[in-house]
Amino acid sequence: MSATRRSFLGAVAGALIVPLVARAQTAAPVRRIGWLGGPTREAAQAFVQPFLQGLRELGWIEGQNLIIEWRFGGGQAERLPALAAELVRLRVELIVVPSTPTALAARGATATIPLITVGGNDPVVLGFAASLARPGGQFTGLTANSGPEIAGKQLALLKEAVPKATRMAVLWNPTTQGNALALKEAETAARGLGTELQILEARSLGDYDAAFAAMAAKRAGALHVMGDVMFVTHRARLVALAAKARLPAMYSQREFVDDGGLMSYGPKFSENFRRAASYVDRILKGAKPGDLPIERPTAFQLIVNLRTAKALGLGIPQTLLARVDQVIE
């Protein structure tokens, strides 16, 4: 090969290699974040999908420029600390903590990695943040807590749906911080409604059968299931037990109603999870979590399952149906 031809081929090869090297040097690094969930992955799909959608809208694609380390406790709170420690060892840049138990576990594992809450109780009351406007430290995101008074609102709506119920059962998990305040609100509302409450504890799935047996023994006329990640995880079992006992029930999230529960009232959690992506985006771009205000829910929804009402022989008053955001028929 002549010297001229070798020179020409060398120049062509160089021209091809330089742009490739330049692109490799300027390509954005793949970022790594963590998700610490309390329920199973299957139970969390209603929240995972809007979160991923929100990320895509902001240019973050899982498997391309973003790695998400998914960890789920399967409804077993005792597993969360070890899973949180595992995420810390993986050196994730932030951890999404969708509930109070997962936030507590993550905070116990790290004092420096940013934590983004999505659906936990009041972060100021829990000591996670100095204030909602300026959290300080490692904690930010969206709280699902609109104040403990929502429990009173839920009870009032249930009474409106089942006006003849003079005794209502309330199922709650005393191990979750913040639930005691909501229970007090429910008790206050019950006095105003002239309704007797039967307070029943459930700390795990194993407590469900005994709780429903106690409801049957006291002839409760309706059931209020307070908000808790453990109840969300095992919602299919709760809905099935309520149906078997022929108990009209109020839940905190629409997922229960989708699974056959009678009614729910609470924040639009799917929207919270979609909006949580903006916190991920800002932190990955350099924002400090303590400088990002924590948002409270502003949109609430009342969902009623008329198929379930019919199966229970319950006629939902038209005055209530007129205020329902969605009816499942």
Image (cartoon, rainbow, N blue to C red):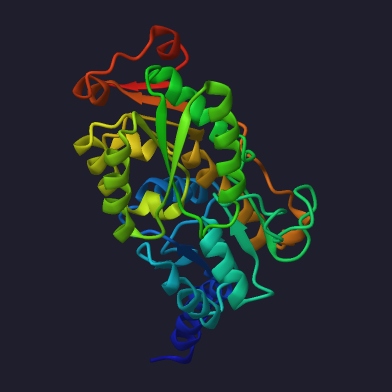
**Would residue 44 be seen by someone viewing this image from the given angle?**
no
Residue that protrudes farthest toward the front in the picture = 218
Q: Position of residue 268 (x, y in %)?
A: 50, 36
- Residue drawn at x 33%, y 49% as measured from the top left: 211
Q: Position of residue 194 (x, y in %)?
A: 51, 22
**In the displayed structure image, the side of residue 67 where residue 105 appears, left or right:** right
Give the vertical position of 156 relative to 270 (above or below): above
**In the displayed structure image, the side of residue 248 where residue 128 appears, left or right:** right
Give the vertical position of 12 relative to 263 (above or below): below
- Residue drawn at x 38%, y 49% as measured from the top left: 232
Residue in the foreground of this view, choosing between 118 and 261:
261
- Residue drawn at x 55%, y 36% as measured from the top left: 186
**In the displayed structure image, the side of residue 142 where residue 200 appears, left or right:** left
**Would residue 250 be seen by someone viewing this image from the given angle?**
yes
Quarter holding the C terminus? top left
The quadrant in which residue 153 appears is: top right
Give the vertical position of 307 relative to 26 (above or below): above
Residue in the foreground of this view, choosing between 98 and 179:
179
- Residue drawn at x 42%, y 91% as measured from the top left: 2
Q: Position of residue 38 (x, y in %)?
A: 43, 61
Q: Position of residue 146 (x, y in %)?
A: 62, 38
Residue in the foreground of this view, choosing between 230 and 26:
230
**In the displayed structure image, the side of residue 264 where residue 54 appears, left or right:** right
Quarter holding the N terminus? bottom left
